[in-house]
């Protein structure tokens, strides 16, 4: 079945993509589909649409859904003793932009992304969301090209080390970023943080901060500075949201 009318790629680009497949231990039947996973929408800003008809956004949409399903199934199988809240917390960290962008850098995806000139100049290759989106697009492309089992195998190889790091408390712990992504998904809005009070001498200050979203207030979180208090408030908010309260 023909998915898309995809443009041909030159020999140099093909060699880079073949090397990438070897590194990732994957094999595309249609290497042009893999190439599409790296094409950012910013390319449209400088190249006529009749020359570049597609970008990686639809593949990202597909890959995001598959990643979520694979991660949930893997966690369900591996940790039968964990309740829904604990599993959801691990999952939210694994599928976060922070974790996915870290995996993308390890695979040198930043060197393969195709960007528009403006996005290139603005540091697009180092943007976490852009790298995470490309990672998800590759998952989607592999599913279309080689089927669900191939996508599952690749995703599990990518995320199993990250799951272990989280379980050992060595993984990503930026609760503010995870909370923000969760709020965007659930409420289509961003949280705000409100300083309630601070007390103590200058060398031993304590701050109390609330996290607010969609009329709901979480916290307060407490810390020796506002940033740590915000992190604590975000952590408390995530614990409540993941329990469905």
Image (cartoon, rainbow, N blue to C red):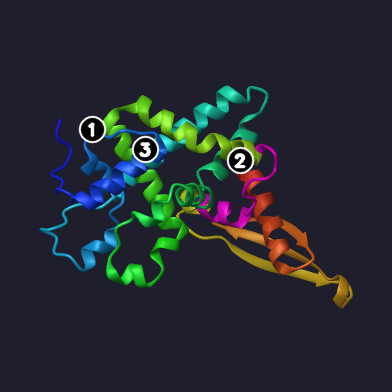
Q: With 19 as the anchor, is 195 left or right in this view?
A: right
Q: Earlier in the sequence, mark 1 or mark 3?
A: 3
Q: Is residue 185 magenta?
A: no
Q: Residue at x 63, y 22 (%)?
A: 80
Q: With 151 as the anchor, is 186 left or right in this view?
A: right
Q: Residue at x 65, y 44 (%)?
A: 240
Q: Which mark is residue 244?
A: none
Residue bearing mark 1: 29
Of tags 1 and 3, the one toward the viewer is 3
The correct choice, above or below, for 165 with respect to 38 in the image is above
Q: Nearer the viewer, residue 89 or 99?
A: 99
Residue 36: percent from the left, percent from the top? 25, 48
Number of residues whose C-alpha sits closer than 10 Å to that of mark 3, classed few (under 14), some (14–19) or many (20 or more): few
Quarter occupied by residue 215:
bottom right
**Which region is colored magenta?**
167-182
Determine the secondary structure under disc 3.
Answer: helix
Q: Residue at x 30, y 50 (%)?
A: 57
Residue bearing mark 2: 89
Give the spatial CA distance, label 2 vs label 3.
33 Å
Q: Which mark is residue 22?
A: 3
Q: Are marks 2 and 3 in contact (CB under 8 Å)?
A: no
Of tags 1 and 2, the one toward the viewer is 1
Q: Are marks 1 and 2 in contact (CB under 8 Å)?
A: no
Q: Earlier in the sequence, mark 1 or mark 2?
A: 1
The correct choice, above or below, for 212 with respect to 14 in the image is below
């Amino acid at each position: 079945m023909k998915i898309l009318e995809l443009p041909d790629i030159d020999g140099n680009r093909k060699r880079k993509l073949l090397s990438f497949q070897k590194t990732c231990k994957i094999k595309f039947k249609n290497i042009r589909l893999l190439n599409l996973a790296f094409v950012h929408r910013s390319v449209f800003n400088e190249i006529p649409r009749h020359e570049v008809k597609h970008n990686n956004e639809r593949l990202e949409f597909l890959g995001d859904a598959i990643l979520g399903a694979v991660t949930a199934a893997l966690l369900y199988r591996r940790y039968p003793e964990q309740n829904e809240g604990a599993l959801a917390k691990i999952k939210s960290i694994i599928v976060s932009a922070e974790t996915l962008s870290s995996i993308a850098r390890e695979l040198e995806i930043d060197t393969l992304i195709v960007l528009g000139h403006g996005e290139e100049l603005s540091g697009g290759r180092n943007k976490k969301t852009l790298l995470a989106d490309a990672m998800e697009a590759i998952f989607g492309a592999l599913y279309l090209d080689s089927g669900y089992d191939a996508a599952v195998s690749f995703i599990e190889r990518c995320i199993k080390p990250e799951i272990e790091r989280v379980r050992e408390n060595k993984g990503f712990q930026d609760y503010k970023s995870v909370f923000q992504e969760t709020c965007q998904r659930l409420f289509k809005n961003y949280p705000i943080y409100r300083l309630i009070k601070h007390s103590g001498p200058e060398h031993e200050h304590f701050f109390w901060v609330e996290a607010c979203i969609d009329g709901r207030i979480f916290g307060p979180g407490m810390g020796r500075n506002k940033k740590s208090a915000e992190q604590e408030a975000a952590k408390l908010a995530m614990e409540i949201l993941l329990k469905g309260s």
